[in-house]
Amino acid sequence: MRPDRWCAIRAATVAVGLLLPAASVADSGLIKNLVFSETSELSSSAEIARRMFTPLAYRRVRSHFADVRAQPIDPAQQKFAVYIPPGPPPEKGFGLLVFIPPWPEASLPDGWSRLLDRHAIIFVSAANSGNDAGTLDRRVPLALLGYENIRRHYPIDAERVYVGGLSGGSRVALRVALAYPDVFRGALLNAGSDPIGGDQVSLPPADLFRRFQESTRIVFVTGERDEINRHGDAVSQTSLRNWCSFGLASVTMPQRGHEIANASGLAEALRDLEAPRSVDADKQAECRAHVDRRLASKVAAAQAALEAGDRSKAIEAVNAIDKEYGGVAEPAIDRLQRELDGLL
């Protein structure tokens, strides 16, 4: 498409309200206070719970989702900042970075526009999505609404859709990447991460987790002097590898503390995100077999307690499986829970 043709189309898109009017549009391509209108099943309360709750937690709440399309947020009441690189999109479309901030403002970090231009990546970030906002009822659905509205109105390369964040926003970005690998092909974790599985980050249903293992690249970007979060990155990376996710990269910013990625840090992180992904099939198969054996052993122990009539021990075993394995163990958890219900 010719550049002048694309510019005309983009101007018309904003003018006719496919993206609702902004309070200000800067020459750089930064659009502030943008209001969106579209929702998606992906951002519904029911779908967020299905993907992000453990099977037992979801079992307890699913009856509340009578309307599976119900949204936790009305997009017409929210504001976003969007940065669109100049010129026509690449042949396969723009990349997209959905950014979850720790602060309440919707803004583009200083120095990022030049690198977004170089990689032809659109940036979107929601207001009032900082660390004071709720995770499941606000930060996650806002990220998904940002993705959905940009996707509908700009040509987007599905293989270059990323979620990222800073500090507490980075921790949420990891959860979003894990639960929505069919949307996000990578995550940029800037100075904040957690181990997956267990108390902090529940694993999604098995089909989604398998896709995460195979197609999601995780890039950690942390300041050299941010020792707490560098340690957290190491713990998170070990956890990801233990769960058979090997598409990891790490960027350390020299002489930097707990702060937003600078130009050189972001440049290296984007290169890592966009690098071709290769999977060692044998290594991944061996890892998955190990995980499956551990799970089978724990399911067998729970089953033995059931057969012995020790309901208390069986409940403890099932709860432990639910906590550690989350959606990966959903079929086994559902079966065991039905048997437990039958003992009442």
Image: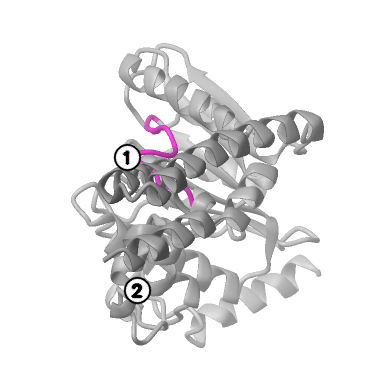
Residue 275 percent across, percent down from the top left: 73, 36
- Give, as a three-letter code, the residue at label 1: Asp
In the rendered image, the vertical position of residue 130 relative to residue 335, given as above or below = above
Instruction: Residue type at mark 2: give it.
Output: Arg
Q: Residue 236 lies in magenta, yes or no? A: no
Query: Magenta segment: does it hold 203?
Result: yes
Which residue lies at the image location 53% right of the left edge and 40% below the top edge?
295
Disc 1 residue crowd, few under 14, some 14–19, many 20+, Cα 10 Å: few
Name the quadrant containing residue 344: bottom left
In the displayed structure, does residue 128 sit left or right of residue 327?
Answer: left
- State which tag comes first along the sequence, 1 or 2: 2
Q: Residues within 10 Å of mark 2 (few under 14, many from 20)?
A: some
Residue 268 visible: no
**Which one is in front, 266 or 237?**
237
Residue 269 position in % (x across, y down): 58, 32
Position in image of residue 14 (x %, y %): 51, 78
Using residue 5 as the reference point, say whether residue 220 is left or right of it.
left
Residue identifier under label 1? 199
Q: Which residue is mark 2?
A: 62
Residue at (38%, 23%) from the top-left corner?
232
Q: Quadrant of residue 115?
A: top right
Highlighted range, magenta: 191-204
Image quadrant where residue 248 sits: top right
At horizontal 44% and vertical 57% (from top left) the residue drawn is 336
